[in-house]
Amino acid sequence: MLALAPHGARSRRWLREKLWPGKSNVQSSASLRQVLLELRRAIGPTVNHYFHTDKNTVSINTDHVIFDHQRALDDQSLAATAEFHPSNLMASIDLADDLYMAWLNGERSAWARKFELFGALDQASLRLQPSSEFPVIALPTVRPRVTPKAALNVRIALLPPSVAYPCPQINRLIPEIYRLLAKSFADLGDYEVIEPYLPASAFWSGDLPVIGPQQMEADLCIGVYLNGADGNQTVTLALVQGRQPLPFWSSETHITSSTASSMSHFLFPLIAGTVDAAQNHLLSASDPDGDSLIHVRALARMLDLSATDIDAAEATLRAEITRKPTAQAHALLSFLMTFRVGQRFQAEDVILIEASQYHADAALALGPDNCLVATLCAYVRSYLFGEHNAAAEQFERALRLNPTYPLAWDLYAMLNAYTGTPVRALRMANWACELAAHSPQRYYFQTTRAITACFSSEHQVAVEAGEMALRERPSFNSILRVLVSSYAHLGKLDEAAAYLLQLRQIEPDFSIKALRDARYPGLDTEGGRHFIDGLLAAGVTQR
């Protein structure tokens, strides 16, 4: 169980819950102490070289131990034997407990994917029982409560469409517009979406949408305008507030006959921009310390990346989970733990990692079809547990649920950059920036664009995106590293030296070794080596 853990470490609490689920804390603690004593006796005088315990954690020194399952990834002759088949992982430990078996089945599925990814076994031989495929653990403490809808949710009304020239293309377009708008707001967790009070099939000519009684009670209305004949349409989305139907914000996109086959694709930036504009308006009009827009504010604070904002977001989310646990709150808290762990793993991080896994499991149990939940849990799976193949599948699922969500494209782009497909990553990052053009956190998306461009040898793009992000976050070391490397690759060594000086004011001991010690992802890929080459050319030392 320690060998399967991130960095070879588990908290004592995690081990007690998995191995002695039916016992009290006193009994399970005593049982764990006895097992640890027996392990120490079995290993002998050199135990401290391989094995470490403290009051919170139990760990193996991964630098001095070779693990069979890891060795089998590199040796196909071992992987082909029944002993090393993923379905036999930990077969000698048989506990009749649902929570333990759900965890073990999840590990077996994850290792089956790793073996498949590394070519150790063919796909057919890795097929496991359906029950082991991505088990979702319904934790008793986070089951949904049957409570009335929170009165604090912001009410978003989608107005009936205003269609000047009905045509078959428009008829196909309208349901997709409403579906994507409703899904985008509902997944964020702070909104109650009011659908049009007339059926979407009832089209009419007119300059302004009709506002009904329900819409008048909404905090914000979204008008849908469609104009144009076959082969050349204009779709306009507008924000309307109060009883006045006049829009105070609008955006539009044009669709021609040449793009008709992929009309939805051309709608995505319009949908994403409208959602961001609506949130910006509602956030500016509401009390920053109030009880509305809790999830939206928490995520915005996290993406600002300051310690104060992350602390505030954590306090808010913990209070929200105590009051009314939601899938979004658990997913956001799981995502927040990745900022706490950082890239320099320490023994005390084990508790944070397991807390992140707990909240991710809870989020997936409460919101299995929520795009925000799928996105953040996929990132946690990749960043904290290194399960890149499984995380990629989860990102793909998030994008099937809602392809207009910029953060899903952004975090998936980072996964691709760090696993050796930086060109694909850059395409995703460019698309995320287009979707997030109206987001207050644009710098966050530009940072991903800069990193993926640097890994892809697109250094002019990396410089453009990096300097754009740096204007909003002048002391962000991730951006400075990219600018140092990319300017060096462009042959502009004076600019590279200036940014390196700025970086060393933040990280005085910055070196290639420090970067590796901090477990910076992707350094051993072709893109990562290219990134390092630029740093070395700029004067960064190996040690």
Image (spheres, rainbow, N blue to C red):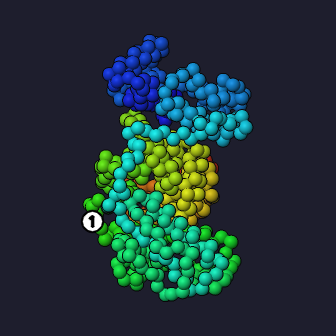
Residue 277 x/y as whole percent: 42, 72
Does residue 391 appear left or right of residue 363 in this picture?
Answer: right
Task: Answer few, some or many: residues within 10 Å of disc 1's Cα (few below 14, many 20 plus, some between 14 and 19).
Answer: few
Answer with the quarter of the image where residue 253 lies.
bottom right
In this view, 432 is above or below 508: below
Q: Residue at x 57, y 69 (%)?
A: 176
Q: Residue at x 52, y 34 (%)?
A: 102
Residue 116 x/y as whole percent: 67, 39
In this view, 418 is above or below 169: above
Does residue 402 appear left or right of residue 326 in this picture?
Answer: right
**50 and 284: which is toward the camera:** 284
Query: In the rendered image, which residue does mark 1 sit on?
Result: 287
Q: Residue at x 41, y 35 (%)?
A: 350
Q: Is residue 450 visible?
A: no
As helix, strand or loop, the secondary structure at mark 1 comes to: loop
Q: Residue at x 54, y 71 (%)?
A: 177
Residue 256 x/y as whole percent: 65, 80
